[in-house]
Amino acid sequence: MSAVGLWQFMTPTAQQFGLRVDTYVDERRDPVRATDAALDYLQWLHERFGGSWYLAAAAYNAGPGRVERVLRRHASGRRGEEEIYWEILDHLPRETREYVPRLIAATLLAENAEAYGFAVRHDAPYRYETVFVPGGTTLRRIADVLDVPVRDLRALNPHLIQGMTPPGEVYGVRVPVGGTRAVVMAMAPSAGVRRAD
């Protein structure tokens, strides 16, 4: 449908959980901001469904309203126990029926990957610095200042969907570690600035 990003947020849900979605910025594409929002949303669903992670996961996938309706019709409105998910399974959309068991399987694999024959390789942490630049600054300009490929800045800033910061506001851009000073120096107004003696 129109879900976007790592956590597949629809626009209204993304905005409800603090993500910016407009012509210049789509934070559903930002793995850092979207992960924080997804965790908040899952916690909210967990509380809404009485402490059941299975029902929370089903609601994350199918929508809380749909799961509420299924619970009213096929579980007398009960919630809070993991077993209820299995009772209503046949009344959920096919995608949701597959989603929750896949999450359970992924969790079991992650907890004991080597026992299941998987070699675990840890990636380097997602490291960056944030530098605030004027509105309308392009990622290409920043890449030129830092002498890095623009694709590196796009990878750090996938939420900047126009490849530039939103006009009319100072905006934080992620740059490789150690790049802040060079960007600040390049963005500082130089014309007509003189040192006062």
Image (cartoon, rainbow, N blue to C red):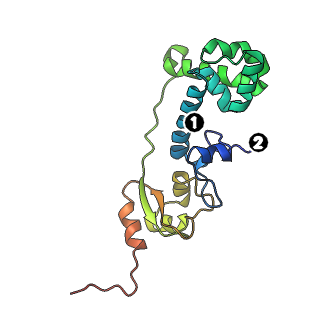
Query: From the viewer's perspective, is 89 left or right of 47?
Result: right
Query: From the viewer's perspective, is 182 left or right of 49?
Result: left
Asked whether 56 or 100 is in front, the reply is 56
**Residue 118 visible in the snapshot:** no
Label 1 crowd (10 A; few <14 / some 14-19 / many >=20): some
Residue indicated by mark 1: 41
Q: Position of residue 34 (x, y in %)?
A: 56, 43
What secondary structure is marked by label 2? Answer: loop
Label 2 crowd (10 A; few <14 / some 14-19 / many >=20): few
Q: Position of residue 73 (x, y in %)?
A: 78, 19
Q: Residue furthest left?
A: 197
Asked whether 117 or 63 is in front, the reply is 63
User: In the rendering, which numbered label is found on residue 129?
Assistant: none
Type of residue at label 1? Tyr
Q: Residue at x 68, y 31 (%)?
A: 64
Type of residue at label 2? Met
Asked whether 162 or 177 is in front, the reply is 162
Q: Residue at x 46, y 36 (%)?
A: 123
Q: Position of residue 39 (x, y in %)?
A: 53, 35
Q: In the rendered image of this protein, does residue 54 appear above or below residue 24?
A: above
Q: Earlier in the sequence, mark 1 or mark 2?
A: 2
Residue indicated by mark 2: 1
